[in-house]
Image (tube, rainbow, N blue to C red):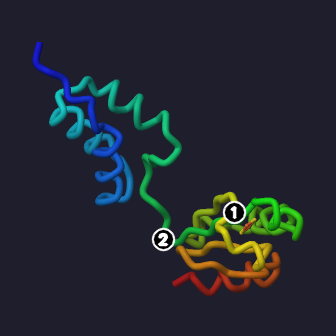
């Protein structure tokens, strides 16, 4: 049997996702073929780690910080307010993150990689609506 190239699989998957935005079935098959690994092994590795995604990212991302300082300052209420809105229809993917290191701005959002300090549900929703085309 041909030599298998499992070393660096995670790095290859990470770079592929960085280039393509997500790991499509075709991309996973390509990686398996090039590394001479069973497709099940490549998919199994990719699906084990939360950092890999199998669907294209939304146009915008909104992460609610749920770290301790943000939690104390109302992150749960902020997250709940955002979960009531149809963010996916607005092209916004909602997620959470644990402490981004700027706790003095709690509670905060990270929107498209930029920190929005001292966020509240009503203002955050209004500001996020402005991201819509
Ligand atoms: S807990 Fe939210 S930035 Fe630190």
Relative horizontal placement of residue 111, taking residue 127 as reference (left or right): left
- Furthest toward the top, the residue is 1
Q: Quadrant of ligand 1?
A: bottom right
Q: Up-down: is 78 above or below 115?
A: above
For the image shown, how many numbered marks are present on the structure? 2
Relative to 51, 114 lies left or right: right
Instruction: Tell me what residue is drawn at x 75 percent, y 72 percent.
Output: 103
The part of the image, by quadrant, that contains residue 114 is: bottom right
Q: Which mark is residue 59?
A: 2
Report the residue that reaches farthest toward the left: 2
- Mark 1 vs ligand 1: CB under 8 Å? yes
Tell me which numbered mark, 2 or 1, is placed earlier along the sequence: 2
How far apart marks 2 and 1 lie (CA) works out to: 23 Å
Compared to residue 64, the image places residue 24 above or below, namely above
Do labels 2 and 1 touch, CB within 8 Å? no
What kind of element bears circle 2? loop
Q: Quadrant of residue 64?
A: bottom right
Q: Residues within 10 Å of mark 2 (few under 14, many from 20)?
A: few
Tell me residue 123's x, y (percent): 78, 84
The answer to whether 37 appears left or right of 25 in the picture is left
| Number of other residues with Cα within 10 Å of mark 1, as a class: few under 14, some 14 to 19, many 20 or more | some
Pinpoint residue 76: horizontal percent, then vertical percent: 84, 61
Respond yes or no on whether mark 2 lies under 8 Å from ligand 1.
no
**Residue at 41%, 28% in the rendered image:** 44
- Kind of element beneath mark 1: loop
| Residue with the mark numbered 1 | 99
Q: Residue at x 23, y 33 (%)?
A: 32
Q: Position of residue 56 (x, y in %)?
A: 42, 57
Residue appearing at x 82%, y 66% in the figure:
69
Q: Is residue 101 left or right of residue 21?
A: right
Q: Which quarter of the rendering shows the N terminus?
A: top left
């Amino acid at each position: 049997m041909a030599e298998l190239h499992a070393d660096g699989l995670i790095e290859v998957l990470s770079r592929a996702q960085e280039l393509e935005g997500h790991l499509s079935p075709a991309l996973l098959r390509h990686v398996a073929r090039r590394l001479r690994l069973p497709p099940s092994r490549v998919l199994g590795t990719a699906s084990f780690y939360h950092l890999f995604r199998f669907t294209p990212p939304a146009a915008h991302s909104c992460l609610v910080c749920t770290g301790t300082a943000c939690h104390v300052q109302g992150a749960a209420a902020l997250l709940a307010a955002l979960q009531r809105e149809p963010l996916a229809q607005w092209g916004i993917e909602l997620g959470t993150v644990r402490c981004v290191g700027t706790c003095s701005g709690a509670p905060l959002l990270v929107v498209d990689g930029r920190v929005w300090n001292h966020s509240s549900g009503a203002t955050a929703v209004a500001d996020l609506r402005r991201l819509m085309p």
